Amino acid sequence: MEELGSWKRTCYCTEVGKQDLGKEVYLMGWVNSYRDHGGVIFIDLRDRTGLIQVVFNPVFAGTAHDKANMLRNEWVIAVQGEVRARPQDMINTKLPTGGIEVWVKELRILNRSLAVPFAIEDEIKINEELRLTYRYLDLRRPEMQKKIITRHRVVKLIRDYFDQHGFYEIETPFLTKSTPEGARDYLVPSRLNPGKFYALPQSPQLFKQLLMVAGYDRYFQVVRCMRDEDLRADRQPEFTQLDVEMSFPRPEDIYELMEEMLAKVWKEIMGLEIPRPFPKMTWDEAMDKYGCDRPDTRYGLLLKNLSDIFPNTEYRFFKQAISEGGIIKGLNAPGCASWSRKDTDDLTYALKAYGAKGLTVIRYQEEGLAGPVAKYLNADEQKLMIERLDAKVGDVMMLMGDKVSVTNEAMNQLRQMIAKKMKLVPENKFNFLWVTDFPLVEWSETDKRWKSTHHPFTSPRPEDLEKLESEPGSVKAVAYDVVLNGVEIGGGSIRIHRPEIQERVFHMLGISDEEAKIKFGFLLDAFRFGAPPHGGIALGIDRLMQILAGGNSIRDCIAFPKTQAGSDLMVNAPNEVSEDQLKELHLKIIKEDLS
RNA sequence: GGGGUGGUAGUUAAGCCUGGUAAUAACGCUGGCCUGUCAAGCCAGAGGGCGCGGGUUCAAAUCCCGUCCACCCCGCCA
């Protein structure tokens, strides 16, 4: 091994170009691949910018060539050499630097490497377990470097954008307070306060509202949030939010602010113009036409409510749905009458995961409606159904009758499955959408009480205030989500800023005066000291990056993510701690019965 | 808490359904040859006992039970 000594890198590998022909350069990096021809030795030298070929010729530099003999992949080296043009027939068109190469005069071997457990290259097929265990090697792969570096660029762009728009980035505490409602908190025991715990923030929601009360007017933060819930491909226990809040806003101000920012990101990063303003859709319309609150508008296959067609139907599934207060919805899959029984059975089976009891499949063929159920529907029902679904010969109609929530969710999934199967989802299309007018609360069947759709600080529409106690379910909120290609990338609202309204909402949510005082007393107090109207939004940076990067999981956009069981395979966290540590924290581990 | 997929040399996979006597391949690795390759080439070689623990059987990578790990999903995620 050798030291770098006084060598200073001239530039990154791919920054060497035609302009440097004949010049002397110092390059440093990793041995990406090693080709020994007995005489001449070629090495592709890699750094974060890419590759350049360096040449060890025994006649040109004997000592360097002898030393190069021992090199292996992933060794770290520094070379001093001369930039030369490659002979015309030796140009490698696959590399940006393929027209030139560096003839090495002196080689310094800075570090060895064991044989790596997987190749440092794109398009590898390796276990995620292995990638996460050796994350620092995984992150060496150009594809991953690109994602992580793009993430830096996006965040930088966002920070600059908000700075230019008069927003201040203000940090909020990580060690804070556990609050009811929302996700499970990560707790941190307090050594100085035996038996008491901090909670890690699920979001800086209350702090940013208090910053508005404090008169900062425009706040943003790129901030980590933590939620102790089960993981998914698009959910990590700690994730990054762009958190924004402003005073005296109309919802339109928030829309414009975010639209301009997102358009800027797409322009800078993807080179694409995003049409503005983004379309808007009310929550009611989204649920009606798409069965979900974050519709993917890149394709059709819209859902149609058919309940009114079957008030007196003989078809027992629909009859039952209607008698139980449910709905019947359908969609038309154009040109799919040729699908096999297995195709539709597979769909039906997949829908069971979403609570669907079944799916009614009706093929529209030359000779009329096919399928076992066609005979249970009378002529009027058939005619109206075909009309409503705008079905043609060769199409297949798929209907379902169930509780409203089940029908919507299952039909939403069905729509997505059909779109995928029929390849109706356009590539490289980015459909942004605002979904507005969310219901303030939803009834929780498990807890038998109203729960916030958004969070308890969301302002009801002023015109709905009178229904707050009498008809909570019909109160709409001044809340909005930004949806991109069927993914909720952010959401926000105008907040409550008057203590008496906040108290009414707490009441409606079943939070007692006493509990409200304990949990949110500081907020209610703050509202009594001249709180301005305020509102904001939060964007999920990880999901945004996933869409920009085009991957299947947000893990690839996070340098050091966790597994589905919430562990970090590289550092081996979480792990046990010593008895002493526990004692200091006044904690005792209860050994679960492991038998 | 539940459903599904996977776990076999360093890696990726085949073998498993239909148990059978040195567990197969490619890439990687090691050594040798080779002065223009860039997925370098040619020759030779090393390397695993099939995630772990039980069971069935004359015999288990193959069958059964349990368990661990990773991934996908439901529940959960204001």
Image (cartoon, helix red, strand yellow):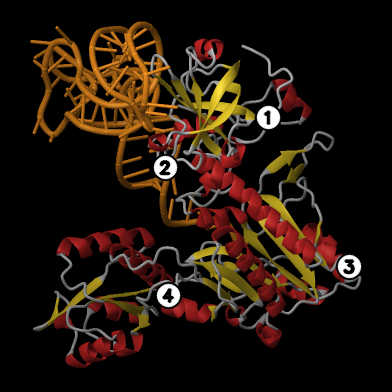
Measuring from the top left, give residue A455's x and y in whole percent: 66, 66
**What is the three-letter code of the residue carrying label 1?**
Arg
Q: Earlier in the sequence, mark 4 or mark 1?
A: 1
Can residue A227 be seen from the camera position used here? no
Q: Pointer 2: what residue?
A: A93
Q: Are marks 4 and 1 on the same chain?
A: yes
Label disc, if present, on residue A9 of the rendered structure: 1
Measuring from the top left, give residue A323's x and y in whole percent: 34, 81
Q: Residue furthest bottom?
A: A380
Q: Are marks 2 and 4 on the same chain?
A: yes
- Front label number (1 vs 3): 1
> Relative to the observer, which residue lies in front, A273 or A330?
A273
- Are the residues tagged 4 and 1 within 8 Å (C-beta)? no
Q: Alpha carbon of mark 1 to alpha carbon of mark 3: how far?
A: 49 Å
Label disc, if present, on residue A215 of the rendered structure: 3
Q: Secondary structure at mark 4?
A: helix
Q: Alpha carbon of mark 3 to alpha carbon of mark 4: how far?
A: 41 Å
Q: Secondary structure at mark 1?
A: loop
Q: Earlier in the sequence, mark 3 or mark 2?
A: 2
**What is the three-letter code of the residue carrying label 2?**
Thr
Q: Is residue A280 left or right of residue A422?
A: right
Q: Quadrant of the C terminus of chain A?
A: top left
> Relative to the observer, which residue lies in front, A584 or B8?
B8
Q: Are marks 3 and 4 on the same chain?
A: yes
Q: Residue furthest right?
A: A529
